[in-house]
Image (spheres, rainbow, N blue to C red):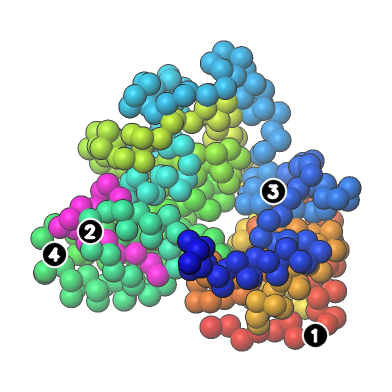
Amino acid sequence: MSIFDKYAAFLERYQMAEMMPKNPLGMRFDEILTPTRARVDGREIILAGTNNYLGLTFDEDAKAAAAEAIAHHGTGTTGSRMANGSYAEHQDLEAEIADWLGMKSCIVFTTGYQTNLAAIGTLAGRDDLILIDADSHASIYDACRMSDAKMVRFKHNRPDDLDQKLERLLPETKGSALVVVEGLYSMFGDIAPLGEFAAVCEKHGAYFFVDEAHSVGVYGEEGRGVADMQGVLDKVDFFSGTFSKSLASVGGFCTSRHAEFDRIRSIMRPYTFTASASPATIASTRVTLAKLREGEGLRQNLWARAEQLHAGLSEMGFTLCAEPSPIVAVRRSSDLETVMGWQQLMQAGVYVNLAVPPATPKGACLLRLSLSAAHTEDDIDAILGAFAQLAEQGAVAVAAE
């Protein structure tokens, strides 16, 4: 018996993917040319699946700051901040993020995934209760598994279901309740009714944790996310985000309006036992954070392109999963149809994300696009032209769940 036998179904799917003209499960880019262009097999393609929402990955100021940081501090920190200490720049970035969001404390992590793992996994203990949206990101589910708390799911974007579960479960809970939702959900591109969730948390005395990984830079004044847009940022106890999307880097952060949050960093195992972010990463992130805060023009162009794409796909009859947002998910009827559609888009020079079970909520099969402020009107027209070829094959509409 092989240790790989339990993955037989996945390995069979991967072997099939390897036989296709392009392997969607092992995509290789020969060169990234710009925030919206790459070279594959000597051919230039449009990138429409990178989460590069503000298009800052090639920002000249950010690149210069990263190069200067390497010159002054070297390429890596070679250890965790608990073992090797913090560079001044790590602490400066934490202070800048806390100021931006009006929070009392902030902890910067090496990855966005690690952020949720450390924060949620440490905040909730043995006698506590974690309630999470059923469509939560894998990092949230894994954080719940890492904690000793009882984890309960509530129906996606349903404050009433959360209310009922808190009403039933709180009397038998010895500790605290932590409610975890996202601002913008990464697969379907739908946003959460954070105001209603905040009201339910306040009613029951539950702590409110919002993951704004995909909504930072996109929503709200100075890009402070959905909570700010909906006027409830001051009701959020813990706010997590990532550097790898709008901030065009790698890393993550969690802020809190509770000063005690900063003091528990030393007992967060993913923080304590992971090497800290490189000097170049921190330096470029500080530059892009400043640009994000001032980037109203970038946000306006991003939204114009999102609405252009959403309207064009809707007119062709494609079934879309949510209202316009920088994430546009096109529902397909099966794994095979989704993979073949992805192949055809690649042949037409457009890269999107292939999203199929088990990585998607409710077993959905999706062609997922994420737009950038760097996309032009002509870029969107080209993307729509590629989808028009799919539409010509018929069966563009799929019943939404």
Residue at the image point whose x is 49% and y is 50% from the top: 213
Mark 4 against mark 3, which lies toward the viewer?
A: 4
Residue 128 among those drawn in magenta: yes
CA gap, disc 1 to disc 4?
Answer: 53 Å
Label 4, label 3: how far apart the Cα atoms are: 46 Å
Estimate the spatial distance between the alpha carbons at disc 3 and disc 1, rounded to whole Å. Answer: 31 Å
The residue under the point 73% across, 44% down is: 35
Instruction: Please identify the quarter of the rendering in which residue 319 is found.
Output: bottom right
Q: Nearer the viewer, mark 3 or mark 1?
A: 1
Q: Residue at x 65, y 76 (%)?
A: 335
Tag 2, which secondary structure? loop
Q: Which residue is mark 3?
A: 373
Say which amino acid is labelled 1.
Gly
Which amino acid, mark 3? Ala
Q: Name the side, left or right, on which 123 lies relative to 248.
A: left
- Observer-nearest of 299 and 16: 16
Above or below residue 69? Residue 181 is below
User: Identity of the amino acid at label 2?
Assistant: Ala
Read off the residue under disc 4. 173
Image coordinates of residue 7 in percent, x first then y, are 52, 67
Task: Tell me the magenta residue range.
Answer: 121-134
In the rendered image, which residue does mark 1 sit on?
394
